[in-house]
Image (cartoon, rainbow, N blue to C red):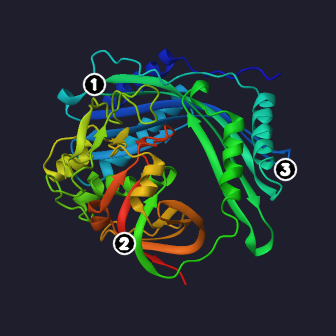
Amino acid sequence: MSEPVRFSQTPEHLRNLAAQVLDIAKRQGATAVEVEVSEGFGQNITIRLGETETIEHNRDKDMGLTVYFGERRGNASTSDFSASAIEDTVRAACTIARQTADDPFAGLADPARLAGPVIVDPGLFHPWDVSVEEACEIALACEAAAMAVDPRIKNSEGSAFSNHASQFVYANSNGFMGGYATTHYSLGCTVIAGEGEGMQRDYWYTSARNREGMESFEHVGKTAGERTVRRLDARRLSTRKVPVLFEAPISGGLFGSFVSAISGGSLYRKSSFLQDSLGQEVFAPHVGIYEDPFIPLGMGSSPFDNEGVATRARDVVKEGKVQGYFLGSYSARKLGMETTGNAGGAHNLRITDTGHDFKALLREMGSGLLVTDMLGHGVNGVTGDYSRGAAGFWVENGEIAWPVQEITIAGNLKSMFKEIRAIGNDRLPRGSRLVGSVLVDGMTVAGE
């Protein structure tokens, strides 16, 4: 059996390294400095058709720092934690800063907004000493469960298991220092059914912070197999305008586009289709989005953001109206606003449902398109125009009728958000956007 892998650095050593950087930068004349020191390790196992294809081990460490000389800043990083390398890296950052132009919006986060003085561990570290042999067995069993679903499943793109652990410390010269460790596990499988031009593929995966949160390998494999078989004998649709139901595994993408549109970089560059949307009704009135950085074992949970600013639970959208943006300190200053504790991005987002389970959503739609797979990245962040390749099922009288392929769905996110008729309670807990299937009225489906 393989020996369990551990961190090579102690949390105390990471804190000491961060403190060294702060001290060296100050001696170099920096007026402010921030640093993040991190370490991670993990393994990725891939099998295909009952044979192990790849076994990858990774271990990395990194130190990234930013120094400020007034309104000028410089960045540098290193993976060498020796004293001489740290000294050279700080010196390089200072040299860069001295040569850059002034930027009045640059600088550390407001000290009053920092988390602390005591940082509570968010409880995201749950080590599972899974050996290479055990990981291979899990991936093999997952693929076998998928292949056993139906004799028409004759090929596989493989099954993959991964586990990763990391820890970090962030510190700045305003007196903040904090960090914690996290773990992440995932298992997925993709299989192929049918022959010739009638072949279809589909997949399923599970992802969690701890072993207990993972779906069983049997369930992952069986679900991947069932989803693949149900796509056989797919047809094309004639072009039409119909309601579209985005299945829960992909519906989070709609809200990812929303997050991007109301994030600081897009807003201060004026490259967002939701420019100046604060207080405006962007969604249908029954849609609410709640940001909660403190969900136990959440993929987006954190007590502070990338600048050490304390995170907080808040309404982002309430009764369809935008209540706040996603801002770090730099973008907030550019916009004349305050940071929202989102340097590094959004945290866990809970999207309210309308009380419908999946079958109720099908009945609510009546006749229309159920989308289960998306292709391409046809979203224009400036105009909101939306056009993506898709596959799924035609729904007739509230029942799935037959599979559909080689179509394109199109609309504009401004109108799509307002035309959300219902949101299901079939949320999947494997990501940071917690949303069920989403029913949108009146999208254009282009086919034959």
- Please state the horizontal and vertical placement of residue 387, each as a whole percent of the image: 43, 72
Task: Report the Cα–Cα distance between label 1 and label 2.
Answer: 42 Å
Q: Is residue 30 above or below residue 229?
A: above
Kindly identify which residue carries mark 2: 411
Q: Is residue 204 visible?
A: yes
Task: Report the Cα–Cα distance between label 3 and label 1.
Answer: 50 Å
Give the residue at x 56% y 21%: 126
Q: Residue furthest right?
A: 51
**Label 3 crowd (10 A; few <14 / some 14-19 / many >=20):** some
For the residue pair 60 and 339, the one nearer the viewer reads as: 339
- Please state the horizontal and vertical placement of residue 317, each as a whole percent of the image: 23, 47
Tag 2, which secondary structure? strand
For the residue pair 161 and 30, the one nearer the viewer reads as: 161
Q: Residue furthest front?
A: 397
Lower position in the chain sequence, tag 2 or tag 3: 3
Total number of numbered labels?
A: 3
Quadrant position of the N terminus in the picture? top right
Lower position in the chain sequence, tag 3 or tag 1: 3
Disc on res. 329 = none
Disc on res. 49 = 3
Query: Horizontal placement of 183 versus 305: left or right?
Result: right
Name the kind of residue labelled 1 in the image.
Ala
